[in-house]
Image (tube, coloured by chain):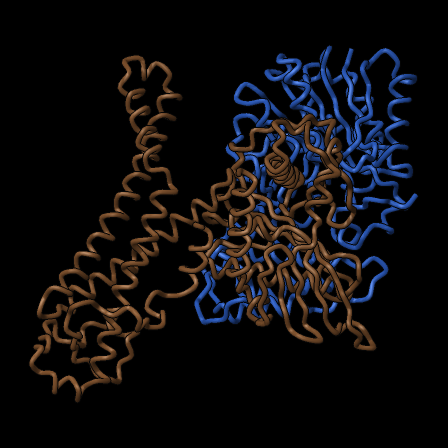
Chain colours: A brown, B blue
Amino acid sequence: MIAMQILHNSLRPIWCAAPDTSHKPHGHPPLHLPLSSALSHHHFLSAPSRFSPHVLFASPESQLDMEVTTETSEWAMQDFYTLRRDVEATSERAEEIRASAGLQQLEEELAALEMKAADSSFWDDRAKAQETLLALTDVKDKIKLLTDFKTQVEDAETIVKLTEEMDSIDTGLLEEAANIIKELNKALDRFELTQLLSGPYDKEGAVISITAGAGGTDAQDWADMLLRMYVRWGEKQRYKTRVVEKSMGEEAGIKSATIELEGRYAYGYLSGEKGTHRIVRQSPFNAKGLRQTSFSGVEVMPLLPEESLDVEIPEEDLEISFSRAGGNCRPITHIPTGVTVRCTEERSQLANKIKALSRLKAKLLVIAEEQRASEIKQIRGDAVKAEWGQQIRNYVFHPYKLVKDVRTGYETSDITSVMDGELEPFIKAYLKFKFSMTLSKQN
Amino acid sequence: MKLSIPRACGSWCKSPVSTTLHKPISFYSSIPSSSPLKPQVPLFLRPPIHSATLSDLQKWHHWAKTLPVPHSDDPPDPTLLRRELKWLLEDALEDHSSVPQMGSHSDDRPIKLRTSLEQLHSVWRQRIEERRPFQYVVGCEHWRDLVLSVQDGVLIPRPETEVFVDLVGDVVTKNGDLTQGLWADLGTGSGAIAIGIGRILGPRGKVIATDLSPVAVAVASFNVQRYSLQDIIEIRQGSWFEPLKDVEGKLSGLVSNPPYIPSDHISGLQPEVGWHEPRLALDGGVDGIDALLHLCNGAASMLKPGGFFIFETNGEKQCKFLVDYMENESKGNFYDVKIVPDFAGIQRFVTGFHH
């Protein structure tokens, strides 16, 4: 349910909703706002400076007047109706979120933590005390956030009520209500997103590795297109996006590339991009211009700080293969699981090894988490291969244009935008899908 | 024998020939920091006094990416060139993070540079057309966690050689006494091994690094000072053991990456190495073993009992030859003599202890 809402709400600005005329105010005279008919309702509250702050309501006696300005008042009413409807919807949404966030449970948790902190032996174990205090702050913040949601809804509701009861309309107030609702919806979006992105590594940066599949130049060109797509996406999100490794194809495109994205939640958003991406097109590298299908593999790993990589890998479990080109750049394989990471492009041998090892550790940690393995030793290598290679998305350029996610069913014909990094709808659809899968598993 | 890793060769400036040819002149002196030979400042340390607009820089970048590579039997790897171009920009720009992805932005922001755009054109042309090693172009090489200054006349430290520091680290962990002893790095070149070891030994350690070449001595001194190790590492100029007469029999450790390429293989080296790096740092005589044998012989008298040594070689053949030599010809001098492979699995190092 939460997941549905997040999609819904974050995909449209609230003032773009079509006016719902079925919601008529009850027992009140129609509102009469002297708005210029040239102004669409969209501009109403967001550009308030153009209106005088105080506007007189038409009295019930001036019915005639009203007839004359039907069009104007119709817009005006709709503006208020839209606002009122948005307040109602947001109120419902906030209530739902408050309920699902387990407010009561949080309060119990808070009480327990406070009791702990008040204990006289609390500071005996400094590390533990710090941990408790952090948890306490976390819970407090969350409760405050949830309480704020309620207060803000109430503020907006009060304004609506006041407006209904008053004889005059206060644009300033309405504007305030609209702002409250706008900001509140943003906050609710963020809250829901953090609920969706609650995996242990979701808030970390991300490392994307792209590998061209079999299929020669066409596949290598496809890998290059994917590289561009993710770099564009990263730059749009204002993540610090760097291509840290790139191996050129013989004729065109790339054999492989690695991108690092630094920034909050990059991994959470991108983790669902992991898998095989398939392209269907008239290949420019195919002399006959025949329709061709190529594949590229995408792997996504969290960009974890060194100190959080609490994994010991015995040296004898590692196979460091040698590639002559460049001398410095060597993939590392974890022999027991067969998990491999590509080499990096650091400028020294040692730096490469350190970086490749931390990539490998991050990958093993993620796989362990996915397989619910408590130890690296328990990872089943065969399962990794099957799961990480699963085909997740089709990009059809010819004979029609369509990008379709195999898992969520989300699709669009605007393939150009997707290739320009417009991945938002795909990412959100997947997060929603993943969340509902988790819920159904739990039940 | 084709050199499979032509870049893996010894460091520069020792006599390529057996030292019997050397007159026993004591050529040894500690080089003060005000050495008459002034080393070049690597690009990344130069002040950012130049400037270019982002779009001009992009134009240069595009030109560099597409500059045709002259025909060659042994052309440079395009992936490596692309990487080098990225590193060149890293070193040349004052703030590399201001240009996240070359080519995805376009504006006239001024970018501060450590060299002029003209120079960038000229050095990249040298890289492509003259096959000048990238490290000489930027004046440095990243080696382990160090960034070492290098220049023409000084061998570029190789990734394989990074293992020296790990091997020494392992030995001193097992045998703490060696930490406080005196170590020597013969034919130090840029000073790479000496600096790597000096940082492991810590404040109570002491390393003497020797080199015959005044350029190498100047560059090594520069690198030692950049890592503030002048109290631990002393650079002496001279051939092999000659500058070490005062410490005979006192060394806890002896390390060297000498010239070990057989003379008639030099012409088959990749152009970056064969055309540009100092021949004296590469050429190890007819079998490439001259310097290594000299080091073996000297090790017996220079090391104290229990002292440790590592020598880098050309590969399996030389490793086996050396081990055989130590076990037969130089019988009783050494124990625990081992061959250690490099990261590519090639038998690269010979290590052991002095009785």
Left/right placement of residue A327 relative to residue A174 reads right
Q: Quadrant of the C terminus of chain B?
A: top right
Q: Residue at x 73, y 36 (%)?
A: A381
Left/right placement of residue A57 relative to residue B264 reads left
Residue placed most toward the observer, B34 or B178: B178
* Residue B301 quadrant: top right
* Residue A140 quadrant: top left
Relative height, residue B112 to residue A289 (above, below): above
| Camera sees residue B160 | no
Q: Residue at x 72, y 71 (%)?
A: A281
Q: Residue at x 84, y 40 (%)?
A: B261
Q: Quadrant of the N terminus of chain B?
A: top right
Residue placed most toward the observer, B38 or A42: A42
Relative height, residue A316 to residue A57 (above, below): above
* Residue A24 quadrant: bottom left
* Outermost residue, bottom side: A68
| Camera sees residue A438 | yes
The image position of residue A41, as x and y in percent, is 28, 75
The image position of residue B34, as x and y in percent, is 52, 39
Relative height, residue B11 to residue B112 (above, below): above
The image position of residue B258, as x and y in percent, is 77, 34
Left/right placement of residue A15 relative to residue A416 reads left
